[in-house]
Amino acid sequence: MSQESDAVREAIEGELRLMDPGVRGSRSLARQLLDPEFTEVGASGRRWTYDEMLAAMPEMDGAAESGPRYEPSEFTGVLLAPGLVHLTYETTLDGRRARRSSLWRKRGTATTWQMYYHQATPLPSESV
């Protein structure tokens, strides 16, 4: 595999881990995947900081083992620069669809990629 495909694959693996209820419900596991400078613009339009997201994630949709889970599809990714990957994909959660974009970065001697930025845009149910 090329360096680009390895980086994209690792970022997608991180993205999928963040959708896992076991990770969403654990601040310590989520902390490993979120960059300390993380920000998000959620599907609601709300801006989230690193601390706000870590505090709220265990109560958010997709965090309960017995509840609805994210169903991701159509992942694409590109290595924008060394240590910076851009992902786009769609999710369905409990019938609600969203287009998503995230930036993952790996700094210095870090061994794992961390989500630096995320944005979700809701899709109308009739949208393709």
Image (tube, helix red, strand yellow):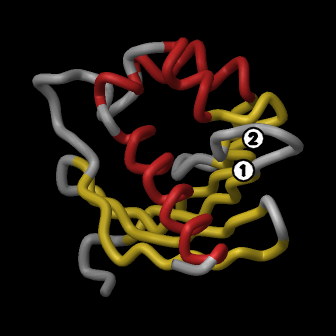
Label 2 SS: strand
Q: Callout 2: 10 Å neighbours few (<14), some, many (20+)?
A: many
Which quadrant of the figure contains the C terminus?
bottom left
Where is residue 24? Give x, y as percent.
41, 26
Asked whether, in this view, residue 22 is left or right of residue 60, the answer is left
Kindly identify which residue carries mark 1. 117
Q: Residue furthest front?
A: 1
Find residue 90 and name its label. none
The image quarter containing residue 19 is top left
Q: Relative to 116, does residue 22 appear above or below in the rendering? A: above
The answer to whether the residue labelled 1 contacts the one labelled 2, judged by CB atoms less than 8 Å apart, is: yes
Asked whether, in this view, residue 118 is left or right of residue 88, the answer is right
Between 42 and 17, the one lying in front of the other is: 17
The image quarter containing residue 115 is top right
Where is residue 65? Give x, y as percent.
17, 23
Q: Relative to 77, does residue 59 appear above or below in the rendering? A: above
Q: Relative to 103, does residue 128 appear above or below in the rendering? A: below
Look at label 1 and name its amino acid: Tyr
Kindly identify which residue carries mark 2. 39
Task: Give how far apart the Cα atoms at labels 1 and 2 are.
Answer: 5 Å
Name the residue: 72% across, 50% down: 117
Label 1 SS: strand
Name the residue: 19% across, 47% down: 94
Where is residue 100? Give x, y as percent.
52, 64
The image quarter containing residue 91 is bottom left
Look at label 2 and name its amino acid: Thr
Where is residue 120? Give x, y as percent.
54, 57
Q: Callout 1: 10 Å neighbours few (<14), some, many (20+)?
A: many
Between 98 and 90, the one lying in front of the other is: 90
Name the residue: 31% across, 23% down: 22
Q: Residue furthest bottom?
A: 128
